[in-house]
Image (spheres, helix red, strand yellow):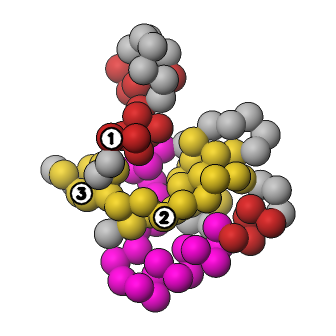
């Protein structure tokens, strides 16, 4: 399973493609379950990059654990959670609230 991720050009925030737009949480991302869906997401990402909406567009591996979408690689887990400097900052702080 894969999802499309990038960084929003306007503010650098990590985003994931979801429902025709870009979501700030990986849990809302459209999941590709086969090669055709991966190709569709890659085309969407290429167009968004060309339109200067996002940068650093990539398909990443995800898994579903207890119904929640989670990135597989540590780098992507960090991008999904926010900065690692303090748990009261970034997306991890929003989840605690």
| Residue at 79% in and 40% down | 10
**Sequence order check: which comes first, mark 3 or mark 2?**
2
Q: Secondary structure at mark 1?
A: helix
Does 68 sit above or below residue 49? above
Q: Is residue 67 magenta?
A: no
Instruction: Give 67 or 55, whichever is nearer the viewer.
Output: 55
Quadrant where the C terminus sits is: top left
Residue 67 placement: quadrant: bottom left
Which stretch did the figure color magenta? 25-45
| Number of the front mark, 3 or 2 | 2
| Residue at 23% in and 57% down | 64
Q: Position of residue 56 (x, y in %)?
A: 64, 53
Residue 92 placement: quadrant: top left
Residue under circle 1? Answer: 74
* Main secondary structure type of the part rendered in magenta: helix
In the rendered view, does 72 fall on the left or right side of 17?
left
Disc on res. 82: none
Q: Is residue 81 visible?
A: yes
Disc 1/disc 2 C-alpha distance (Å): 15 Å
**Sequence order check: which comes first, mark 1 or mark 2?**
2
Q: Is residue 44 magenta?
A: yes
Does 10 sit above or below residue 94? below
Residue under circle 2? Answer: 59
Disc 3/disc 1 C-alpha distance (Å): 15 Å
Disc on res. 64: 3
Quadrant where the N terminus sits is: bottom left
């Amino acid at each position: 399973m894969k999802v499309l991720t990038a960084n929003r050009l306007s503010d650098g925030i990590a985003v994931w493609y979801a429902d025709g737009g870009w979501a700030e949480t990986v849990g809302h991302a459209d999941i590709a379950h086969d090669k055709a869906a991966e190709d569709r997401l890659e085309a969407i990402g290429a167009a968004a990059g060309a339109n200067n909406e996002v940068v650093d567009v990539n398909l990443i591996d995800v898994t579903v654990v207890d119904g929640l979408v989670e990135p597989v690689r540590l780098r992507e887990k960090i991008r999904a959670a926010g900065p690692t400097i303090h748990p009261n900052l970034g997306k991890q702080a929003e989840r605690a609230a």
